[in-house]
Amino acid sequence: MEEIFLEAELREKKGRAGVKDLRESGYLPSVIYSHGKDALSLQISRSALLKLVHQHHLETSVVTLKIKDDKKAKGRSCLIKEIQYSPVGEEIVHVDFNEISLTEAIKVNVPIEASGEAVGVKQEGGSLEQLLWEIEVECLPTNIPEKIEVDIIALKMGESIHVKDLVVASGVKFLHDPTAVVLHIVEPMKEEAPVEEAEGEAKAEPEVIKEKKEVPGEGTGEAEEKEKDKK
């Protein structure tokens, strides 16, 4: 496992105004959560974090936080719990960390990535459908795979790859239904030709509702009453 370090400082500025000043000075507000301990409010360099984002898959990487004036001289081993982005744009505005133990197994989601071009697509004209994009695994933090790579080159039309077919390093356990389909090759959907009207078939005309004519002798009785009054 490659060691990833990130420097941090205890955060004193809090509240909306404090956070605004923090961001304007090139820092990001952050929080580290530890089991059975109070959360710590931190501040980290925005540029340092962005550098790590571009170099590593941080969602599955262990980050060692080196907190200034912290009693843990070796730093705190953490996983990123959440990266919050601005509602408008892709700007990072806040980061949450979970402190972990390197000697205890944890559960984490790992992305699944298809590798190569399948025979069923290249030669048979099929389409690749990926149904499972990430999978939950259980392992020691030092054994977390960055991704699960799936070789699909030999996959033919109608064939599938299931969770039980995935290859993973020793010490990593899949927490998913082994029979679940990860991806498969299917025939491309055919467009249905528009239904043409049969020759000689007349189009149905809308029914015309005609006004009902009054039949002599029928009515509400009002006309009969008028006749009696004349007499």
Image (spheres, rainbow, N blue to C red):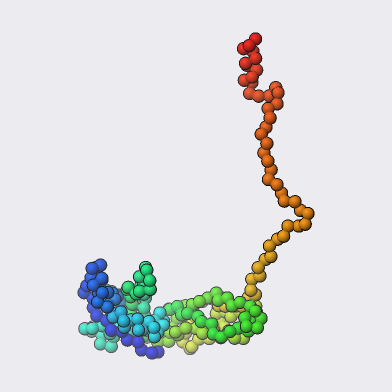
Q: Position of residue 90 (x, y in %)?
A: 38, 73
Q: Position of residue 6 (x, y in %)?
A: 31, 84
The C terminus - image quarter:
top right
Above-or-below relation of 70 to 91: below
Q: Nearer the viewer, residue 35 or 75?
A: 75
On screen, residue 162 versus residue 11, left or right, reads right
- Residue at point 38%, 82% (across, down): 53
Q: Could you tell me if residue 105 is visible in this image?
A: no
- Residue at point 62%, 12% (across, down): 229
Say which quarter of the image contains residue 52. bottom left
On screen, residue 19 versus residue 80, left or right, reads left
Q: Could you tell me if residue 2 is visible in this image?
A: yes
Say which quarter of the image contains residue 104. bottom left
- In the picture as drawn, the residue positioned furthest to the right comes out as 200
The N terminus - image quarter:
bottom left
Q: Position of residue 34 (x, y in %)?
A: 31, 77
Above-or-below relation of 128 to 167: above
- Residue at point 65%, 83% (across, down): 123
Q: Position of residue 115 (x, y in %)?
A: 54, 85
- Residue at point 21%, 83% (across, down): 69
Q: Nearer the viewer, residue 66 or 37?
A: 66
- In the picture as drawn, the residue positioned furthest to the top comes out as 231
Above-or-below relation of 18 to 123: above
Count of marks placed on residues: 0
